[in-house]
Image (tube, grey):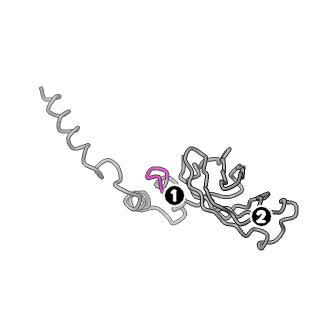
Amino acid sequence: MRFVILLVCLSATAANAGWFSYDDYEDCMLGRMKGQPQSMYNLADRACSKQFKVEVAVPKDGVEWEFTYSIGTVSVKIASAGDYEVTKAELSFSDKPCSESKTLEDFSETLKFTFKRGQASVEHPLTKPMLKCARVDNFRGIYK
């Protein structure tokens, strides 16, 4: 009988947020950094960002992606992003082939993408007749 009462009491208190886990990202960072040296910040940030699905900047060189363009629609597919799930991106486009697109002025069309399961499409009547090259301005995502 005592075991049953103890079990009921423990299950009732475990439901209170913050008693055995953190309520949000800020609470997590405060809890993980308490008494820790500043050098532990990145480790705590990564753990808390992963736990609370905080959107972070994703290194461009760690993402494998490709784009397709048909009249009025630009689609981007993420093949691999390492430890991240890409959620957003800004890409700039050029009507020149990538081998000829050397300056920032060559990439005049910038579009914002929101990804679901690694894919995103934007319907947009771009001013360029044919997009041949794309450049990543930034990727955002969450830790897997």
Q: 129 or 53: nearer the eye?
A: 129
Neighbor class of circle 1 (other Cα within 10 Å; few <14, some 14-19, many 20+) is: some
Tell me the number on the disc at residue 6: none
Q: Residue at x 61, y 47 (%)?
A: 119
Inspect the magenta stretch and tell me whether residue 51 lies in it.
yes
Among the two numbered marks 2 and 1 on one chain, the one whose residue lies closer to the N terminus = 1
Which residue occupies the extreme right position in the image?
100
Q: Which residues are magenta?
A: 50-55
- What residue did someone put label 1 on? 55
Residue 21 position (above or below residue 7): below
Q: Residue at x 30, y 52 (%)?
A: 18
Q: Amino acid at mark 2?
A: Ser
Q: Does dot 1 land on a helix, a strand or a loop?
A: loop
Which residue occupies the extreme left position in the image?
1
Residue 3 position (above or below residue 130): above
Q: Residue at x 31, y 47 (%)?
A: 20
Q: Residue at x 25, y 44 (%)?
A: 15
Image coordinates for residue 85, horizontal then vertical, percent: 57, 48
Q: 131 or 15: nearer the eye?
A: 131
Image coordinates for residue 118, horizontal then vertical, percent: 60, 46
Image coordinates for residue 130, horizontal then vertical, percent: 77, 58
- What residue did someone put label 2 on? 94
Inspect the magenta stretch and tell me whether residue 96 lies in it.
no
Q: Main SS of the magenta segment?
A: loop
Q: Amino acid at mark 1?
A: Glu
Q: 4 or 127: nearer the eye?
A: 127
